[in-house]
Amino acid sequence: MSAMPILQVEGLSKSFRGLQAITDVSFSILSGSITSIIGPNGAGKSTLFNLITGYLAPTAGEIRFQDRSITGMATNRIATLGIARAFQIARPFRDLSVRENVRIGALFGKAGPRDVEATTRRGMELASLISLADRPASALTVGQLRHLEVARAIATRADLLLADEPCAGLNPTETAAMIDVLRQIRASGVTVLLVEHDMPSVMEISDRLLVLDAGTLIADGPPHEVAKNPKVIAAYLGTPEVLP
């Protein structure tokens, strides 16, 4: 794994009319890693994602991607630099096939030369959707739609994928399949940043955990260490993880 950070967040804060959603959060994400952001509901996880992807502008602080400031940059410009987001609730073009949906992602995203058909195929392969390429999105299961959402994001030729609760609502088989997809994406050279509530999945897949509570970063480190942190146990886990 490269020791170089792909994303750096320094002193990030966001307030909404006096409500402090994010307070002085700082961390860096190493290129080639899988990092998960966890925390109780209302901890600020979605707000943090919205700040990184340009849906919100910070009140204070800086966000740097590949050593370039993207603070307050418009969402479409951030996408052209190589950041993509896969949302928890998939909203595909339901009358289009899986291939056509992924091809739309391949037409946009990171700036520079592109081979739309090759990029479309790569997105479907990484998301394990090749066998469903000609199926209409309206015929997909919830788990398959989640794969499609990830495939469309990857097809933008992203260097950094932000995945918002990719395992939420999935059964154990679907969850295992999504974990495999995320590992394949990381193996392809894409850095992955997750927001996720499914703790078994988080513990299995993550190189590192960031823990938010009430908008403040209370822990940052390897999963087994973070799971033993008294602050994390009190704020989120409730009881110590039973670890091998």
Image: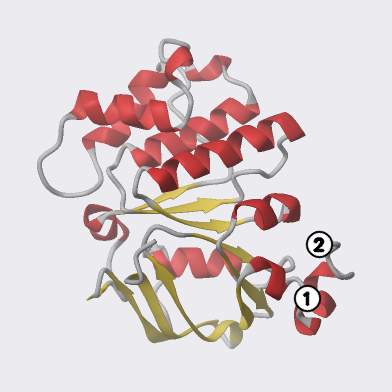
Q: Secondary structure at mark 2?
A: loop
Rendering coords of residue 54 (x, y %): 36, 65
For residue 171, say whether it is visible. no
Point 55% across, 62% down: residue:
207
Is 84 above or below relative to 240?
A: above
Classify residue 233 as left or right of residue 46: right
Rendering coords of residue 164 (x, y %)? 55, 52
Instruction: Write the residue at 40% across / 17% down.
Output: 96
Residue at 22% in and 23% down: 117
Among the 4 quarters of the image, the one containing residue 195: bottom right
Q: Are marks 1 and 2 in contact (CB under 8 Å)?
A: yes
Residue ID for mark 1: 228
Disc 2 marks which residue?
243
Q: Nearer the viewer, mark 1 or mark 2?
A: 2
Residue 113, percent across and down?
10, 41
Q: Amino acid at mark 2?
A: Leu
| Front in this rendered view, residue 129 or 186 | 186
Name the spot of residue 163 as percent of width and height, x first: 51, 51
Estimate how packed mark 1 is, as few (under 14), some (14 to 19) or many (20 or more) residues with alpha carbons within 10 Å. some
Q: Specify the amino acid type for callout 1.
A: Lys
Number of numbered markers: 2
Q: Which element carries disc 1, helix, strand or loop? A: loop
